[in-house]
Image: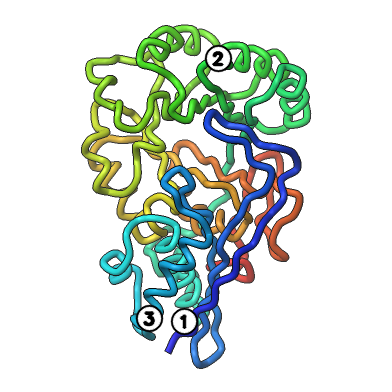
Amino acid sequence: MIRCQTRIESWALHEPFEIAREVITDQAVLLLTLTDTAGHRGQAEAAGVDYDGETPVSMAAQIAELLPRLHDGLGGAELLDLLPAGGARNALDCALWDLRAKQSGTPVWQAAGLPALQPVTTAFTIGLGDEATTRRKARAARHYPLFKLKVDARRHLDVVRWVREEHPGARLVVDANQAWTPALLRELLPQLADAGVELVEQPLARGLDAALDGLQPPIPLAADESCTDRASLSALVGRYQFVNIKLDKCGGLTEALAMAAEARRLGLGLMVGNMCGTSLAMAPAFLLAQSCRYVDLDGPLLQQQDRAVPLQYDRGVIQPPLPALWG
């Protein structure tokens, strides 16, 4: 029988992190540990989807309701029927992958039928702020080749200009977190293209995606909040060029891998993102990152501390996770 333990943790950020809808100073996560009768242990972490009302407390409650149905042979495919997409299923799914790896001695990438893991380059995210703060952050991160810039309905072109002046060679992605109107999007796209921005993430509010019908953007658009699991993909075709897959949104690595395959079949480009958190949350997503054009797994870089066995970051390049961390 599998024993399940959950613990709520809070990880302080280096400084307040602002996006269009909120400011956070620390990241609350749910740590889940599965242990079998032989003492093998699998772990995972989930932050959940806060804009859908998920919290570590609500995720722990979902998992507690499922405890009577946990059994030795439980796998990710069965979890898809037991829990909806979201952070609770993500935590259980990724902990199961880790547990099976520890039991078998076979790393997760191999069990999932993936090629051997290779280093990937992540974006470094700069949250919303005033000019002085934005320039300071851009200068401090000049060794990163790719920036993801948080913007809103008022702060957008200026943010791009400030960062471009501080780091002329950087590749730039902007993320509006649903803050723009269709009119503002159409106004900004040519100017963003002229500034060398190569991707715009979730410009419109979820539910307004039909406003993108017929738009031929000069730079690609990526769906984030509008993209959840496989069921959401068909409505994005012809409106977005990329989808941002996050394990907390889709409900774990099992669904994320299937979702990536379906997105490719539909002609959608791949991005992997995160809801913040430690290296334990990034490690399963690292497997998905192997097939993604855009990688945004910088959560630990925004925090004051990390796990005892962290992912190794060097100038934006992430090395594969060690089995002592996950997988």
Q: Along the polypeptide, which appears first: circle 3 or circle 2?
A: 3
Residue type at the position of mark 3 = Leu
Q: Is residue 280 left or right of residue 202?
A: right
Quarter of the figure with residue 140: top right
How many angstroms separate mark 2 from mark 1 (CA)? 53 Å
Q: Is residue 291 visible in the rendered structure shown here?
A: no
**Mark 2 and 1 residues: CB-CB less than 8 Å, in contact?**
no
Q: Is residue 306 left or right of residue 260?
A: right
Element at badge 2? loop
Q: Quick one: 166 or 14, which is closer to the camera?
A: 14
How many angstroms separate mark 3 from mark 2 (CA)? 49 Å
Question: Which quadrant would the N terminus be assigned to in this image?
Answer: bottom left
Residue type at the position of mark 1 = Ser
Label 3 sits on residue: 70
Element at badge 3? loop
Label 2 sits on residue: 154
Q: Is residue 58 above or below residue 260?
A: below
Residue depicted at x 26% and y 67%: 81
Q: Is residue 125 visible in the rendered structure shown here?
A: yes
How far from the left and from the top, in percent, is residue 104? Answer: 47, 81
How far from the left and from the top, in percent, is residue 95? Answer: 48, 70
Mark 1 packing: few (<14 Cα in 10 Å), some, or many (20+)? few
* Number of the label disc, if any, that sits on residue 104: 1
How far from the left and from the top, in percent, is residue 144? Answer: 68, 33
Q: Quick one: 149 or 114, which is closer to the camera?
A: 149
